[in-house]
Amino acid sequence: MRLLLVEDDRMIGESLRSALRLEGHAVDWVRDATAAHVTLASERFDVVLLDLGLPAGPADAQGPRDGLDVLRALRARRDATPVIVLTARDARGDKVAGLDAGADDYLVKPFDLDELHARIRAVVRRHAGRAEPLMVHAGITLDPATRQVTKDGVPVLLSAREFAVLEALLQRPGALLSRAQLEDRLYGWGEEIESNAVSVYIHQLRRKLGADVIRTVRGVGYYLGAADPSVPDPAAGDAA
Amino acid sequence: MNSIRARLLLSLLAMLVLAALVLAAVTYRNVLAETEALFDYQLRQMALTLRDQGEIAADQAGPLTDEQLDFVVQIWTVDGRAIYASRPHVDLPARALLGLAEVRVGTQLWRTFSVATRDKVIQVAQPVEIRRRLAAHAALHSVLPLAALAPLMALFVWWLAAGTLRPLRRLADALRLRDAQTLQPLPDGDLPDEIAPVVQALNALLKRLERALDAQRAFVADAAHELRSPLTALKLQLELLQRAPDDAGRRSAVEGLAGGIERAARLVEQLLTLARSEPGAPVGVVERLDLGELARAALADLHPLAQLRKTELVLDAAEGVDVDGDRASLVALVRNLVDNAIRYSPAGRRVEVRVSRDAGVPVLQVDDQGPGIPAADRARVFDRFYRRVTGDEEGSGLGLAIVRSVADRHRASMTLDDAPGGGLRATVRFPLRPAAEADNAPDPVAAGAPTNAPPSAFTLP
């Protein structure tokens, strides 16, 4: 998944970025409210991790002053990207203000990485409208918590990046994801994108899960096909 | 006996007694003087009447023997033979002084009036005691109403004192009901003029206390908040170490952890330094110190950091620039100024520290070649935990707060300007004669000065 980390503290930011990358996420990290605002206005993320106590940034006084401002501006644009607020403010008033400003969840520093990962999974699940923690499609089961994938009940071993591609496709089975969109899921800023990496991961996934699981719309992107090839696939029509 | 009510009551009673005594004495004297004239006249009239009548009339014999008036009439012949005595038992001398006279017989003093005719001497005498008794009687009577009034007045004073002191009691009750956190002002409406100043002074004290308490609370909350960031970083770094998939990951995690621990230690140290330099904190030994030597010590502390950042440290110290103060906190002042200069300048620049006298005033100046601080932000950078937009350095946000706090305690002024070569110039000007002033300076805390007093207080232990 592609995450935006908004955190001004260098050490916390670096550690979180490393931890989230270990978990297979693509992480972009900004350190002030203005940068967060600009980034959120121009790019899409699966989850935003937002520190409330941010410096305003070098911009003029018109910009957002802190994390809450960033959050309000995001919601004012009717952007429903899940937001988990990370903050050292544990007063109840701050929690209420954060949630009321549109946060989906709230974590008080210092927190456990396991809890953070679980909450990220939970808000993504809720955002996708799923109640069950497992992602299931056409005989493929993906457990975001344990990072286990099975095909017809048989465990399949995937690399972190393969897992990320499959997870992205499983979030909205049938919906078309372009190569650029998948690259976004895989690489944060400053990470070198290997050329045709996405094609390689798709190839690996097809090898491990079966050739007909991931369909290609040539020149447009990829989608997860229906379990039964005879069933008409709506996405194919859309893509045409 | 320290009750206002009891004291009022006693004072009133004492005044009543005194008034009664004075009244009685005056009455006694007046009555005595009046009766003197009256009785003397009576004595004289009686004697003259007896002389003119030649004998005692029957109707006069009664009054003459009246015990109450105690007149004693004696008549002698010219040759001294007593021919009449109204009361023979009285041992008045058998001789008479003509006119008014006082005669002592035994313990009794008599007032006599004697007249002589051709053939006899008539003397009318009366004990002076009678007159005194009458005067005392009159005096007693004049005092009696006062005595009767005294209990009433005492009751009234008791009641009056209770009523007058009720606001004090209410005040005491209101104060007793408070806990340590209740610092709202006391109600000060409808108070007697004598008690209102007490309540106003109390309210002013409560306000100062509240400000001080708020400042303390804010400090603790800020400190806790600030400690949370390094702790969060430490926790994350530790978890990263536990999850590191390979040696390279572990190495980088250990490096991060070491950095995190160093940062937490530095923050705690800075918090302690700040707490020690806050107004009211006890001060170490105040001694005369060479400012150039202090700067040298601070720069030596910072040498490793300067090397790391490839910063050139330059010290230009004049000889014999002395200041009076606490060595540890003054070194902390210089160190924090230079530390900031190093941290917030790009690597490879120069930080210049100058120690000099400007018109006799010891001056410490630190110039860097960093980005400087916009004039609009200069006032705020002294606030503790205030950080401007972060560069790569994790400042504690306390450096300049410590500098300001130490400067304030040493009555030094602190200014930020543009350095001539670009960058920031921090200037600390120490007082001209710090020793003489500091020695006599009242402890601002002990003296109850408001916590937002002008930055001057150099607190001595």
Image (spheres, rainbow, N blue to C red):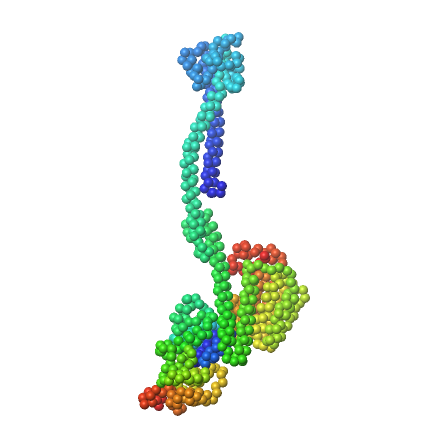
The residue sitting at 48% across, 29% down in the picture is B25
- Give the residue furthest to the left: A231
Quarter the C terminus of chain A occupies:
bottom left
Total numbered labels: 0
Can you say which quadrant of the picture contains the N terminus of chain A? bottom left
- At a point 46% along the width and 36% down the height, the residue shown is B13
Task: Say above or below: B233 vs B209.
Answer: below
Q: Which residue is situated farthest in the bottom direction here?
A: A218
Q: In this view, does B124 lie above or below B291?
A: above
Q: In this view, does B265 lie to the left or right of A100?
A: right
Residue A28, horizontal then vertical, whole percent: 46, 79
- Corner quadrant of residue A36: bottom left
Give left or right: position of A1 versus B350: left
- Residue B404 shows in the view: no
- Asked if A98 appears above or below A192 in the picture, the reply is above
Q: Residue at x 31, y 88 (%)?
A: A231
Depth order, front residue of B164/A115: A115
Q: In this view, does B145 lie above or below B37?
A: below
Residue B209 visible in this rendered orientation of the protein: yes
Q: In which quarter of the image is residue A220?
A: bottom left
Percent position of residue B155, x then y: 41, 38
Question: Which residue of the protein is positioned furthest toward the right in this rendering?
Answer: B319
Instruction: Give coordinates of residue B425: x percent, y percent.
Output: 58, 70
Q: Position of residue B444 (x, y in %)?
A: 55, 57
